[in-house]
Image (tube, rainbow, N blue to C red):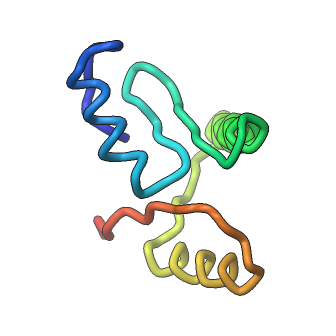
Amino acid sequence: MNPFATPGSKEGGMVIRELIRGCDAVLLVRHGAVTVGDDLMDAYFKMEKIEHAAESILTAKLFGSVEELTSEQMRKLLAVREDYGLKGKLYLPESTE
């Protein structure tokens, strides 16, 4: 997530510009998501993945709690993704554990 910026402002554009360089999707505080891709359909399918993940997380929270993956677990999953030749930039936040 990124800091809040006024929609359409130069500040907002700078926030997105800096974040989107390292990933294919950005969650904007109090705005929603922005995705980029090789073409419009690629960006659309990335947005669909975000929506599906959000729906799954919401459903899980309604039935109890959501246990987040550790940074190490995420690194392992990213390595598997690379092994399968999946492309796309991913951002792995630094550990807060």
Whether 62 is drawn above or below 72: the answer is above
Residue 72 seen: yes
- Residue at the image point whose x is 36% and y is 36% from the top: 16
- The residue located at (58%, 47%) in the rendering is 65
Point out the residue furthest to the left here. 11
Residue 75, image x, y percentages: 51, 79
User: The N terminus appears in which quarter of the rendering?
Assistant: top left
Q: Residue 84 falls in which quadrant of the image?
A: bottom right
Answer whether residue 56 is visible to the viewer in this image: no
Q: Of residues 13 and 50, which is closer to you in this image?
A: 13
Q: Report the residue at 28% width, 35% height from top.
A: 15
Q: Nearer the viewer, residue 32 or 34?
A: 34
Whether residue 16 sits left or right of residue 10 in the image: it is right
Question: Left or right: where does residue 39 sit relative to residue 78?
Answer: right
Using the rendered view, name the quadrant where residue 63 is placed: top right
**12 above or below 53?**
above
**Placement of 45 over or under 77, stated as above or below:** above
Residue in the image at 34% along x and 13% along y: 8
**Label tally:** 0
- Can you name the residue that lies furthest to the front here? 39
Q: Position of residue 12 (x, y in %)?
A: 29, 24
Which residue occupies the foreground of this view, 57 or 65? 57
> Split into 4 quadrants, where in the image is the C terminus?
bottom left
Q: Estimate the x, y position of residue 68 in percent, counting from the top left.
A: 52, 60
Q: Does 14 sit left or right of 69 as displayed?
A: left
